[in-house]
């Protein structure tokens, strides 16, 4: 058997990580300014993270949700405190797509309606419902096509109002900052209108925080910037720092019943230990403040560089739009200067998603290498 060839990959084999750095099988050192799709939040191989996992592995790795697992309650309390939603309810699963899948199903159960609004350039996952509301026809299989998914232009308030007037809407799902779409943000008035229309029409507001959550924007949820509360928040990626875990935070007015949602592996002992370690480190090391500070420094330095059209995003979820396709630049940063960065569906956008623990000297290292690479490409 061979690997199913669906990922274009670089010829690099990471062997070890520490903080914001990675070493490959040849001993070459790289600055990780991408965090494996925003997954590495507290840094590679953080000592507290490793200790938490090791201690838990010596006790119990897994049992199903048929028993009491006190780690789940501890995690719910710490996430509720970090995210300032202490009265919400927590459902644990395994990935961001699964979190969004459960959030959409939950909305349909709660409202007894079928239709969901999402937005252009949005990405919500690759499972059945999540991919149906994702704006990428290439990855939507025929079986996933459904008239229940309504994809509207981002920030088009008129289209949003008209759709609510015409259709029975179960939920609106939206990223606080769009990730793979190119680091685009909803306007404040648009987000507040979503909240208003959901309230008026009995729909649920689902805040997809899979990539833009866990403090990456400088707030726990990027949606917090808009001064609204969602009915449902979905989380994954950074909350486990590399250990697969997803979560759905559910407002208190949404009532559960036995069998409504379920997951075999969701909220297992090891996953909870990983997420607890992340929450503890984020609090102890003030990583949300660090994300805000380092992000502001990056934006200020990058916006005056040559060929930069725009710098978008907040905190350590940034997109740099250049006046050329970034493929050559990204390859040069990685292969010549040892810096991992990301791309977007907009081929001119370089995405930056470093660990929230990044230090000033690492920001300076990145800026230096980006400047050198841009000068070389310009020549």
Image: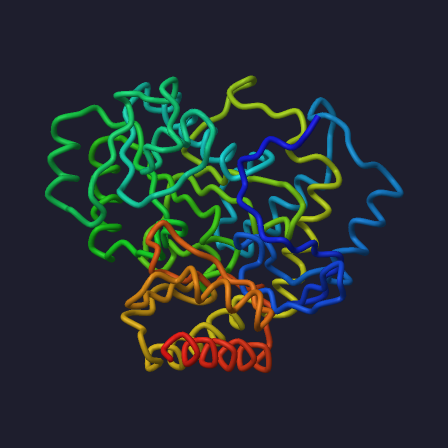
User: On screen, 305 above or below 261?
Assistant: below
Viewer-proximal residue, 147 or 320?
320
- In the rendered image, the residue lying farthest to the front is 379
x, y percent for residue 258: 56, 18
Q: Position of residue 339 (x, y in %)?
A: 57, 68
Residue 342 or 312: which is nearer the viewer?
342
> Where does the image place residue 229, in percent across and percent down from the top left?
36, 48
- Residue 300 or 292: which is nearer the viewer? 300
Q: Would you place residue 170 above or below residue 344 in this image?
A: above
Colour treatment of the image: rainbow
Give the answer, above or below, for where 301 lies relative to 141: below
- The image shows residue 263 at horizontal and vertical percentages of 61, 25
Q: Quadrant of residue 65?
A: top right
At x 73% / y 30%, what residue is drawn?
Answer: 68
Give the total of numbered labels.
0
Quadrant where the N terminus sits is top right
The correct choice, above or below, for 310 with respect to 361 in the image is above
Residue at (47%, 28%) from the top-left corner?
127
Identify the residue shown where x is 60% and y is 64%: 32
**Which image quadrant is residue 27 in?**
bottom right
Q: For the C terminus, which image quadrant?
A: bottom left
Left or right side of 329 for 82: right
Left or right relative to 197: residue 175: right
In which quarter of the view is residue 4 placed?
Answer: top right
Closest to the observer, 344 or 97: 344
């Amino acid at each position: 058997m061979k690997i199913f060839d669906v990922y274009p990959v670089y010829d690099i084999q990471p062997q070890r990580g520490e903080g914001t750095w990675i070493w490959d099988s040849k001993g070459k050192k790289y600055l990780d300014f991408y965090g494996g799709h925003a997954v590495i939040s507290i840094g590679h191989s953080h000592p507290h993270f490793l200790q938490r996992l090791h201690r838990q592995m010596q006790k119990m790795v897994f049992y199903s949700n048929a028993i009491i697992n006190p780690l789940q309650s501890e995690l719910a309390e710490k996430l509720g405190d970090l995210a300032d939603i202490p009265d919400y309810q927590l459902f644990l699963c395994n990935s961001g797509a699964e979190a969004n899948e459960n959030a959409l199903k939950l909305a349909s159960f709660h409202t007894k309606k079928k239709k969901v609004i999402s937005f252009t350039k949005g990405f919500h996952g690759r499972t059945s419902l999540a991919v149906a509301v994702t704006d990428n026809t290439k990855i939507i299989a025929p079986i996933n096509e459904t008239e229940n998914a309504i994809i509207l232009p981002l920030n088009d308030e008129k289209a949003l109002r008209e759709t609510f007037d015409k259709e029975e809407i179960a939920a609106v799902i939206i990223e606080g900052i769009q990730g793979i779409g190119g680091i685009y943000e909803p306007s404040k008035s648009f987000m507040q209108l979503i909240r208003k229309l959901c309230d008026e029409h009995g729909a649920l507001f689902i805040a997809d925080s899979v990539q833009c959550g866990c403090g990456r924007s400088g707030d726990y949820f990027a949606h917090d910037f808009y001064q609204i509360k969602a009915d449902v928040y979905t989380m994954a990626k950074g909350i486990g720092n590399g250990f697969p875990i997803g979560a759905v935070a559910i407002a208190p007015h949404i009532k559960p019943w036995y069998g409504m949602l379920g997951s075999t592996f969701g909220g297992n002992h090891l996953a909870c230990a990983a997420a607890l370690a992340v929450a503890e480190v984020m609090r102890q090391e003030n990583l949300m403040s660090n994300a805000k500070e380092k992000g502001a420094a990056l934006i200020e330095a990058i916006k005056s560089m040559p060929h930069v059209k725009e710098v978008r995003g907040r905190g350590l979820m940034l997109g740099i739009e250049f006046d050329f396709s970034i493929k050559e630049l990204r390859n040069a940063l990685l292969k010549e200067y040892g810096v991992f960065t990301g791309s977007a569906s907009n081929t001119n956008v370089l995405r930056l998603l470093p660990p929230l623990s990044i230090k000033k000297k690492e920001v300076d290292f990145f800026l230096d290498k980006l400047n050198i690479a841009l000068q070389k490409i310009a020549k």
